[in-house]
Amino acid sequence: MQSDTLLHVANFSTLFVCMVLKFPQIFALVRAKSPSGISLNSVLLELTGFIIFVTYQMYYDYPPPTYLEYPILIAQDVILLLLILHYNGSLRLSLVYALLLVGGWRLLTVERWIIDLAMSLCTFISAASKLAQLQCMWSSKDAGQVSALTWAMGTYTCIARIYTTTVTTGDMQVLVRFVAMTLLNLWVLLTVVYYQQRRSGRSSKKYD
């Protein structure tokens, strides 16, 4: 009974957090009217990983509570992508990205081996999205408009999903993905905090 309660708490807290996960990042971007520090490649890779993951879960009829947050995350990532393109002056490219993503999603379920192969690559795709964000910050030595709160919430949802996957499906591919994403999300979070504190320290010295 206690484990069932904990499972429900993990599932619904993850769903709730994911409903607002990208909001801090979206608000920071709109407020600044600049996507500085936010990697376009990171968002595209993350979106691709989300699409593959939710398609895999649905294809194999996994319990809906274990992946319900992904359609919400996909919608938020689409909004974030459009805002980045808008502030970059490249909104016309949104149609190209839409065609590629929709076409790729349709291709996933044509054959079973395709979705299995895509899922085996999903962890690498999602990991690449985090590394792209890290590279963006390392190259500029600044976190720009990257939201620490968004990455903190992302870390929590991955930790919760490690637990729910362990007690429900036990799928090793999914479990490995969440462990890797937890570590990488935490790495990005710590990097964002580091650069934000460094920027805050420089601002304080300027006004001393």
Image (cartoon, grey):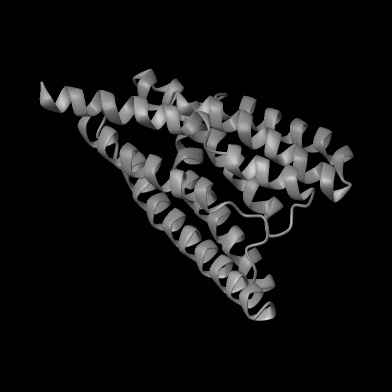
> Which percent across, then down, holds residue 137?
63, 66
Can residue 76 be seen here? The reply is yes
Can you say which quadrant of the picture contains the N terminus? top left
Total numbered labels: 0
Q: Quadrant of residue 110?
A: top right
Q: Residue at x 79, y 48 (%)?
A: 33
Q: Quadrant of residue 166?
A: top left
Determine the residue located farthest toward the front in the rendered image.
208
Can residue 61 be seen here? The reply is no
Q: Residue at x 36, y 39 (%)?
A: 174
Q: Is residue 132 above or below residue 175?
A: below
> Which percent across, then down, holds residue 66?
36, 26
Q: Is residue 43 above or below residue 110?
A: below
Along the line of sight, which residue is nearer the eye, 162 or 99?
162
Along the line of sight, which residue is nearer the eye, 188 or 51?
188
Q: Along the horizontal axis of the image, is 40 left or right of 16? A: right
Q: Residue at x 59, y 37 (%)?
A: 23
Can you say which quadrant of the picture contains the C terminus? bottom right
Along the line of sight, which residue is nearer the eye, 21 or 56?
21
Q: Residue at x 51, y 69 (%)?
A: 194
Q: Quadrant of residue 168?
A: top left
> Which percent across, then down, holds residue 37?
68, 60
Determine the residue located farthest toward the left in the rendered image.
1
Q: Along the horizontal axis of the image, is 107 left or right of 49? A: right
> Which percent across, then down, holds residue 38?
67, 55
